Image (cartoon, rainbow, N blue to C red):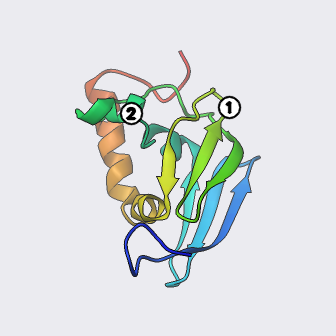
Amino acid sequence: MAGLNAGSPMPTELTLHAASRKLDIAFDDGARFTLPCEYLRVFSPSAEVRSHGGPMQTVPGKRQVGIVAIEPVGHYAVKLVFDDGHDSGLYSWDMLYALGRDQAGNWQDYLDRLAAAKLSREVE
């Protein structure tokens, strides 16, 4: 198995907890992350969220979103299928690692962007 970047940590476990809406991922360097489905959804690598190369879009109303399927993409990524119908982002191992490593800062940035836009995490 090869990562996107030579020497990148590779996943050793990937476990979806549907009831709590969390994805656990462990890597071969010992790192382990628990990533909420909401976090993964609002930080999707899709063009829709990434604004086709522009600034990242602030996606509101995803507090209760879940993952209904995880589809492998080669040996380098997974496609996460969310219960709101979103399924266009490919999450590389490098991206999942970075999302885990940078979760606290990313999440605070997201909450700040929601507040600035007067948007809610709840479905409106």
The residue identified by callout 2 is 47
Horizontally, residue 95 falls left or right of residue 81, namely left
Horizontally, residue 75 falls left or right of residue 115, namely right
Observer-nearest residue: 31 or 121? 31
Residue 120's image quarter? top left
Q: Residue farthest to the bottom?
A: 29
Mark 1 → mark 2, Cα distance in angstroms: 18 Å
The dot on residue 83 is 1
Q: Residues within 10 Å of mark 2 (few under 14, many from 20)?
A: some
Observer-nearest residue: 94 or 16? 94
The dot on residue 9 is none
Q: Image height check: is 87 above or below 98? A: above
Q: Image height check: is 65 above or below 76? A: above
Q: Image height check: is 98 above or below 26? A: above
State the count of labels.
2
**Residue 7 x/y as whole percent:** 40, 81
Secondary element type, mark 1:
loop
**Residue 46 x/y as whole percent:** 43, 37
**Residue 124 x/y as whole percent:** 53, 15
Residue drawn where x is 49% and y is 84% of the image: 29
Residue drawn where x is 64% and y is 39% of the image: 81
